[in-house]
């Protein structure tokens, strides 16, 4: 079964450093997303991406965050200058088409620890 | 997005059916009812979704009340692997994002 894959599975970084989390969405999908989950808390939406541009973003997704689809297969989340509070599990997701009935498929997550 | 209300936790015995309730009294006519689950240390996983009619798939069944103000996810025979947090989510906006609440933590006893 097709799946969303994420790398790295776990990254430890120093505060202030830049981090790039990578994702390979399901190959024929058109919508891409990043979510995060701080330990013990809810899954939170960060950003959605369609047709090479951001279609929606949450208040969490400030100027420190950016997303990119550098080629036909990868989708990345960059955090420019990490803070302690960015420590969380980051989930990439993708869906095939728009519409509220459509299924969103999630990856296994990248666990980011900022020290 | 419209709000959903779920019990914080539920317990079940292995190999018995489980009925996970969800209230969504402010649902609008175009809202789909989605269920996702999150196993420990994993990403959310799609379970099932529906609009008005009851739905079945290989994982579960979704029973939707006639007025659509509540729904029930049914696991026909719970296994230990079904222990997870189950989220009932209404999808309304055109942006396709999912808004996760606290969900129901299902514990399955052997």
Image: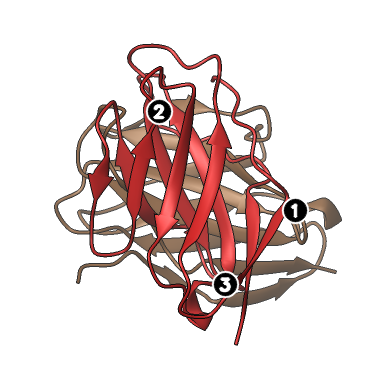
In this view, the mark in front (1 or 3):
3
Which type of secondary structure does the marked residue at label 2 adopt? Answer: loop
Residues at marks 2 and 1, CA–CA distance in whole angstroms: 40 Å
Disc 2 and disc 3 in contact, CB within 8 angstroms: no
Pointer 1 residue: A86
Q: Position of residue B100 (x, y in %)?
A: 58, 40
- Structural crowding at the residue carrying mark 1, measured as other residues with C-alpha within 10 Å and reported as few (<14), some (14–19) or many (≥20): some
Q: Color of chain A here?
A: brown
- Structural crowding at the residue carrying mark 2, measured as other residues with C-alpha within 10 Å and reported as few (<14), some (14–19) or many (≥20): some
Pointer 2 residue: B65
Residues at marks 1 and 3, CA–CA distance in whole angstroms: 28 Å
Disc 1 and disc 3 in contact, CB within 8 angstroms: no
Q: Quadrant of residue A19?
A: bottom right
Q: Which one is nearer the viewer's eye here, A100 or A25?
A: A100
In this view, the mark in front (2 or 3):
2
Residue farthest to the bottom?
A: B110
Q: Is residue B42 above or below residue A21?
A: below
Going 66% across and 32% down the picture, which residue do you hit? Answer: A62
Q: Position of residue A84 (x, y in %)?
A: 85, 57
- Left or right position of B77 against B106: left
Q: Is residue B10 above or below residue A97?
A: below
Q: Chain of mark 3?
A: B
Pointer 3 residue: B83
Which type of secondary structure does the marked residue at label 1 adopt? Answer: helix
Disc 2 and disc 1 in contact, CB within 8 angstroms: no
């Amino acid at each position: 079964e097709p799946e969303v894959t994420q790398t790295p599975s776990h990254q430890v970084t120093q505060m202030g450093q830049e981090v790039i989390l990578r994702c390979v969405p399901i190959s024929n999908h058109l919508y891409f997303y990043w979510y995060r989950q701080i330990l013990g808390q809810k899954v939170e939406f960060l950003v959605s991406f369609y047709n090479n541009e951001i279609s929606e973003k949450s208040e969490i997704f400030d100027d420190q965050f950016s997303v990119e689809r550098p080629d036909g297969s990868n989708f990345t989340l960059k955090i420019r200058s990490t803070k302690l509070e960015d420590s969380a599990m980051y989930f990439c997701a993708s869906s095939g088409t728009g519409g509220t009935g459509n299924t969103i498929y999630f990856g296994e997550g990248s666990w980011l620890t900022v020290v | 997005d419209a709000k959903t209300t779920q019990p914080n936790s539920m317990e079940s015995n292995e190999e018995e059916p489980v009925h996970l309730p969800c209230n969504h009294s402010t649902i609008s006519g175009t809202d789909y009812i989605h269920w996702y689950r999150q196993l420990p240390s994993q990403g959310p996983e799609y379970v099932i979704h529906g609009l008005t009619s009851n739905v079945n798939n290989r994982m579960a069944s979704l029973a939707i009340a006639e007025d659509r103000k509540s729904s029930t996810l049914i696991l026909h025979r719970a296994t230990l692997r079904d222990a997870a947090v189950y989220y009932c989510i209404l999808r309304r906006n055109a942006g396709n994002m999912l808004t996760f609440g606290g969900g129901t933590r299902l514990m399955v006893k052997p």
